[in-house]
Image (cartoon, helix red, strand yellow):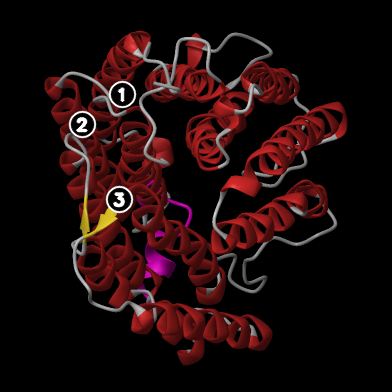
């Protein structure tokens, strides 16, 4: 998003775009298969049971579909395709994909650290670490070759960013260890408000950065206040994380409340920029899902509400709200901005969001009903069967939409040096 044309057929950026959409299709296919297994458990193929496909589905969506658009963004910002490093960038993308294939094989084989989204262990962990290191060296080489042509501010900012990225592989190794407890409260099994706030602040940081990299400011309005509040939010996170506590503690609830102003502030900030044509639908979708995600997170975290829906389909609904709703809109917007082309036919975009809305509503209703007691596990009530059928049907629409987006990506054939 440096003002270049769309990527060429052989560019590293284009490779990252296609691989991300390929993993989205595969992840959606696995998700549809899982929804069918909930209706017909006898369709499981031993030894690849439901429990082994779940980590594959979750990690493919996170490290495949969600991560590769960010890698494409890094390629764009550091101008990898302009300094004759395209082949190395493409190799880094293939290394990333190969590590995901090895990871999926391990998860289906029953190997996992046991930590959600951090299931890397053994050879799969080292393969993924190697893929991250390869990527970092490609980005570092691009920075070295191109940074002399950049402004001093951009050179320093990207150098700081590269320093931060160098820590990611080691952080993942540490966080994947079963001996490191995940960010939840041990007494309730639920997340802490500070952990939710901290993870959201990383996303907020990206949403603050995108317009300042991908768009052109159209006002003289200063944005100092939004950055001050961003820093204050991190301070609040640090204090709440240090204090610990549960969803019954006011300081943990208060740390979550610091997310609420961002529902209004981020869209207002983005209106100060001029955006490329074709990005409006995804910008609207991203902020719609962002607002719903924050508001529902605050509501669900309250005492009584979290205790009722914890470990039910309601949390599955919220996961789909975060991934299929917000994250997909965020990643789709990135791809549109990077390629200067639409992601897919308008009908597929409508179908995607309509299916997500219906699926979330069905899962949320199921979760609320499950919270009243465990009797549904033995009786298989009609409301649960109907909800699972709706979930599977929505999965068909999501898979179809993602396939159309992958096919559309075949049109990415412009020369980035033009």
Q: Which residue occupies the foreground of this view, 414 or 67?
A: 414
Estimate how packed mark 1 is, as few (under 14), some (14 to 19) or many (20 or more) residues with alpha carbons within 10 Å: many
Q: Earlier in the sequence, mark 3 or mark 1?
A: 3
Vertically, is 14 above or below 266? above
Q: Measure the alpha-carbon separation of dots 2 and 1.
A: 8 Å
Vertically, is 288 above or below 411? below
Q: Position of residue 250 (x, y in %)?
A: 46, 91
Circle on res. 395 = 1
Q: Measure the alpha-carbon separation of dots 3 and 1.
A: 34 Å
Q: Position of residue 59 (x, y in %)?
A: 59, 34
Circle on res. 355 = 2
Circle on res. 168 = none
Q: Is residue 311 magenta?
A: yes
- Which mark's residue is nearer the viewer, 3 or 1? 3
Provide the secondary structure element on which disc 1 rests: helix
Q: Earlier in the sequence, mark 2 or mark 3?
A: 3
Q: Residue at x 77, y 54 (%)?
A: 167
Q: Which residue occupies the foreground of this view, 199 or 88?
A: 88
Circle on res. 215 = 3
Q: Residue at x 72, y 32 (%)?
A: 138
| Magenta region, residue range | 304-314
Q: Is residue 62 left or right of residue 243?
A: left
Provide the secondary structure element on which disc 2 rests: helix
Q: Is residue 412 left or right of residue 15?
A: left
Q: Give the quarter of the image for residue 303.
A: bottom left
Vertically, is 207 above or below 227? above
Q: Which residue occupies the foreground of this view, 65 or 104?
A: 65
């Amino acid at each position: 998003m440096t003002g270049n044309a769309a990527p060429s057929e052989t560019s590293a950026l284009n490779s990252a775009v296609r691989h991300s959409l390929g993993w989205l299709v595969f992840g959606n296919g696995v998700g549809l298969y899982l929804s069918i297994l909930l209706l017909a458990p006898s369709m499981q193929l031993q030894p690849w049971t439901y429990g082994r496909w779940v980590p594959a589905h979750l990690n493919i969506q996170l490290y495949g579909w969600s991560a590769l658009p960010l890698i494409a963004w890094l390629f764009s910002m550091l101008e990898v395709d302009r300094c004759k490093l395209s082949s190395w960038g493409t190799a880094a993308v293939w290394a990333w994909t190969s590590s995901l294939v090895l990871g999926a094989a391990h998860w289906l084989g029953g190997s996992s650290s046991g930590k959600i989204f951090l299931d890397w262990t053994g050879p799969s962990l080292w393969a993924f670490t190697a893929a991250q290191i390869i990527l970092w060296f490609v980005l570092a080489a691009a920075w070295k070759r191109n940074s002399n042509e950049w402004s001093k501010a951009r050179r320093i900012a990207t150098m700081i960013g590269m320093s931060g990225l160098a820590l990611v592989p080691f952080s993942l190794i540490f966080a994947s260890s079963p001996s490191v407890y995940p960010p939840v409260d041990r007494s309730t099994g639920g997340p802490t408000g500070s952990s939710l706030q901290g993870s959201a602040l990383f996303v907020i940081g990206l949403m603050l950065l995108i317009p300042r990299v991908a768009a052109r400011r159209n006002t003289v309005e200063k944005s100092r206040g939004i950055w001050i509040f961003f820093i204050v939010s991190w301070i609040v996170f640090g204090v709440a994380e240090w204090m610990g506590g549960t969803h019954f503690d006011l300081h943990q609830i208060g740390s979550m409340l610091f997310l609420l102003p961002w529902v209004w502030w981020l869209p207002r900030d983005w209106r100060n920029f001029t955006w490329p044509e074709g990005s409006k639908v995804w910008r609207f979708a991203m902020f719609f899902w962002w607002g719903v995600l924050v508001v529902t997170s605050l509501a669900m975290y309250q005492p009584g509400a979290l205790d009722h829906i914890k470990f039910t389909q309601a949390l599955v609904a919220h996961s789909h709200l975060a991934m299929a709703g917000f994250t997909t809109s965020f990643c789709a917007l990135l791809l549109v901005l990077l390629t200067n082309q639409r992601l897919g036919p308008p009908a597929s975009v409508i179908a995607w969001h309509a299916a997500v809305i219906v699926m979330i509503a069905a899962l949320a209703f199921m979760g609320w009903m499950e919270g009243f007691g465990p009797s549904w596990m033995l009786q298989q009530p009609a409301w649960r069967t109907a909800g699972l059928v709706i979930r599977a049907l929505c999965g068909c629409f999501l898979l179809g939409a993602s396939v159309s987006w992958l096919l559309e990506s075949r049109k990415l054939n412009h020369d980035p040096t033009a």
